[in-house]
Image: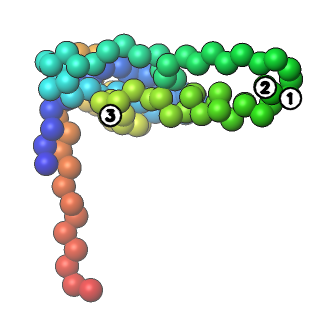
Amino acid sequence: MKKEFVVKSIDSAPDGAPYVVVSLSSLKDLKEGTQTQQPPFGTPKVMGFSNMNDMMKDLNKMMSGLGGGMQSGITQLKLEMHEYKEMGLSVGDKVFLELSKAETLGV
């Protein structure tokens, strides 16, 4: 299977390691204009608390909004620095991602 994408962003590794994270967006999504800008951690949620105990009880509910709201339609790849430099990618470039299943023969 071969899919066409556009490079949406290129970010350095969050932990300072020698790799970059390349975010790809489907060309189909960009043409249709279905993508909307969302905060990176989903929709902000505001919760009111009357006392400290209520806040601690509902802390899990608050935190659940942070992790599960990643942007949909975004494919991210982790590339080593030498791979990134070799490819010469920049934001807005069209790229193709080809997936194939490994053939297993025998046992």
The residue at the far front in this view is 50
Mark 2 belongs to which amino acid? Met
Q: Nearer the viewer, residue 95 or 34?
A: 34
The residue carrying mark 1 is 53
Vertical arrangement, residue 6 with respect to residue 2, above or below: above
Can you see residue 23?
yes
Q: How many marks?
A: 3
Q: Residue at x 32, y 15 (%)?
A: 36
Q: Residues within 10 Å of mark 3 (few under 14, many from 20)?
A: some
The residue carrying mark 3 is 75
- Quote the CA–CA distance across marks 1 and 2: 5 Å
Residue 28 in the image: state x and y as whole percent.
14, 26
Q: Residue at x 22, y 64 (%)?
A: 102
Mark 3 belongs to which amino acid? Thr
Please indicate whether residue 39 sits to the left or right of residue 97 in the image.
right
Task: Describe the element under mark 2 as helix, strand or loop.
Answer: helix
Which of the image's four quarters has the C terminus?
Answer: bottom left
**Label disc, if present, on residue 55 of the rendered structure:** 2
Q: Nearer the viewer, residue 18 or 92?
A: 92
